[in-house]
Image (cartoon, rainbow, N blue to C red):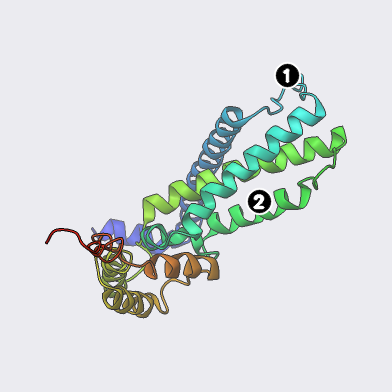
Amino acid sequence: MTELLNFLGHYWWLAFPVFGMTMGAVNARVKRRELAARRRHREQLELIRAQGGAIETPGAAPMPLAAPTDGQQRLIAAQDAVTHRWLEYELDATKLITYPAMSDGRQPLTAAFLRAKKAADNLRPTEGETLSPERLREYRDAVTDYEVAFDVAERDARRVKDAAFTADERKRLDTAKQLLTVATDQAATPNERQLAYRRVREELDGLILLSDEAVDVLEKKVALELPRERTAPPASGPPAEAAPGSAA
């Protein structure tokens, strides 16, 4: 033990290069992991792109575009399909409560999706416009990015659900979801639906911001009247009076 202490006393300066070598090895390992994760991410995106439409593969000749008009219409339809899937979250309060990250622009993947949506919208041709081949390629890439960004954001939102909220906040979200069932239940009375709807808005206050469109859709569901009961049809008229001189 004494010899070890003497050695350390004379060669204490060796700790610095050893520490530097250790940290260098750790940093190198972390960097390798980051590079591997990025590579897997790129491979995943390329796979999704390949499934969603034509892409240019490194080392291979670019895949030819279809006829401008046909290819353009397919791209417009593909963009509309993604937008429709997004609106299912934006306009459905139940899905918005269940997967709040889909409407939270502070989430990195949601923010990336919204940027991709804006880029595709900016490149979308106006009605009656035919894009040049170069513009068509740009629009195709933007729509592909839009599809990929939405898929990635949706998978992440379904994975994390309400994990970003505290236990008390998650309880409020669960309460809001239960009340929402009452608010849109046609078997409930109008007063019950209105009361449940007000409670839903109170529970969501400060947690989730419903868009104006989502509020309009929800209020229309809440305002639905109860189905009216069928009643017997009224009599066609008073009974005919007996003709004069007829038998009693």
Q: Are marks 2 and 1 in contact (CB under 8 Å)?
A: no
Which residue bears the numbered disc 2?
A: 116
Front residue of 205 and 112: 205
Image quadrant in which the C terminus is located = bottom left
Q: Secondary structure at mark 2?
A: helix
- In the displayed structure image, the side of residue 16 where residue 1 appears, left or right: left
Residue at horizontal 48 percent and vertical 72 percent from the top:
209
Q: Can you tell which of label 2 and label 1 is closer to the viewer?
A: 2
Q: Residue 218 at x, y = what percent?
A: 43, 66
Image quadrant in which the N terminus is located = bottom left
Quarter holding residue 56: top right
Q: Secondary structure at mark 1?
A: loop
Front residue of 57 and 85: 85
Give the class, few, some or many, for how many residues have Cα within 10 Å of label 2's Cα (few <14, many ≥20): many
Residue at the outermost front position = 245
Report whether residue 144 is seen.
no
Q: Residue 5 at x, y = what percent?
A: 31, 61
Amino acid type indicated by mark 2: Ala
- In the displayed structure image, the side of residue 196 where residue 55 appears, left or right: right
Q: Which mark is residue 60?
A: 1
